[in-house]
Image (cartoon, helix red, strand yellow):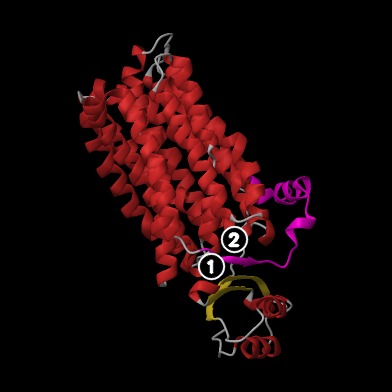
Amino acid sequence: MNASEKKAIAGLGGIFALRMLGLFMIVPVFAVYGTQYAHATPFLIGLAIGIYGLGQAIFQIPMSFLADKYPRKPIIIAGLLVFALGGAICALSTDIYMVILGRLIAGSGAVSAVVMALLADVTREEHRTKAMATMGLTIAMSVMVAFGLGPILTHVLDISGLFWVTVASAIFAIGLLWIVPTPNRVLKHNLNNHSVKAQFAEVLKIVDINRLHLAIFALHLSMTAMFTLLPHQFHDVLGLTVAQQGFVYLPLLLLGFIIAVPLIIIAEKKRQMRAVFLASLATLVAGLVVLAVASQTIVGLIIGLAVYYIGFNSLEATIPSWISKRAPVANKATAMGINSSAQFLGAFVGGAMGGILLTKPMWLSWTVLAIVTVIALLFILPIASPPYLTSLTITLPTGIDTTAWSQQILAIDGVDEIVMMPKENIAYLKLDKEKLTDDTRQHLSHLTGQTLAI
């Protein structure tokens, strides 16, 4: 990766981490101590944990439509301010319904897909999975850190203080956005000529992308329900207090990620994304089956979680990369927005389901989650491998009219997209090597003023 890509990953990863910390620090605390709020019930506690997903699901797609038509950064800033507002409402609440409202508003600051689309804009195709894997690790690590920090900060700051920390994290995330390069996107398609309905329809008609939406829905449904159930089961089986449980989550997730990394590399380098994807989904199911059968024992609980995390980390990294490869060039943010909506809708359903399952036997709870994931796997099995494109980084020629030059580049058959970053004096080209001929390669080299190894 070059310096511009590393800077983008650092900044956008930091934004994701701060948002995830704000959303998830509440989970282990609220699952145990949510009863202190007026009108609290197990279902409402689970709803408060997962309701942010409903806000995300509702607003992710509209914000993604806007991000395909207008600059992405202002949209991200607006979303983070809404997130901060939701945190402030939660901090001032004494009633469970006000907490639910605050979490819903916080979730409405739906910038996940826009952030992912911005990351895709400033990373080359061959580094996309690596970038997404880094983001996946950042997200997973921030969730685990949140489980460790939540109880500690609540002890020091009280529950309202914990929500004020989420407000501060949103403000700091806005500051991180300034270190991310601002791309000048130039597409073959004129987005202003596409209605919202046309953009939406163009993405939804791609069946394989819909299968990826189902996969991310099932993944985050199981994850959110799991994190609602685990604090109580860790106490019952391992005898751990809430403050101690984070020290179990973190090493298990790290182990899962270390094992998942080679799978992610194979998926991209060996063009085996479909095989790795389906194997990871099967691994996720296997972890839930182990939990259904043996979670009442220490060994069964630990092994089941470790196996689950291997599948979870691999899927978390490969799904966004697959979306960016398969989505129409002009509607990338829209496709990612629909995927993020499916993800957070899964989190919403998972939180509510987890609240209901809290009153059921644990073996039944894990069995229900395993069945849901198996059903999703059956629908996803026919998915085809994604297209594999190549990205090149070139130095912008001096003394050119960038608009006219970019249109000449895009007119070449085999060039799918060009993303220019004038401040860095570079441009990224997305190419389909199979469409390029010797003549078009020579013409492309002439226009760029460079000998291109393609």
The residue nearer to you, when weighing 360 against 73, is: 73
- Which residue is denoted by mark 1 in the rendering? 125
Check disc 2: other Cα within 10 Å, few if <14, some if 14-19, many if 20+. some
Residue 258 placement, left or right of 97: left
Check the image and report above or below for 241 versus 422: above
Q: Amino acid at mark 1?
A: Glu
Task: Report, in whole angstroms, how far the alpha carbon at label 1 lies from the one at label 2.
Answer: 8 Å
Q: At 65% from the left edge and 42% from the top edge, which residue is drawn?
A: 62
Where does the magenta region start and end? Answer: 182-210
Badge number at residue 325: 2
Q: x and y percent of residue 87 in the render? A: 43, 30
Element marked by disc 1: helix
Residue furthest toward the top? Answer: 39
Q: Amino acid at mark 2?
A: Lys
Density class for disc 1 (Cα within 10 Å; few <14, some 14-19, many ≥20) is many
Residue 312 is a magenta residue: no
**Front-most of 115 and 388?**
115
Q: Compared with residue 84, is residue 402 higher up or lower down, i.e. above or below?
A: below
Residues under numbered marks 1 and 2 in contact, where contact means CB atoms less than 8 Å apart? yes
Above or below residue 215? Residue 131 is: below
x, y percent for residue 184:
59, 67
> 299 left or right of 37?
left
| Total labels drawn | 2
Whole-percent x, y for residue 331 in the image: 67, 55
Q: Say what secondary structure mark 2 lies in.
A: helix
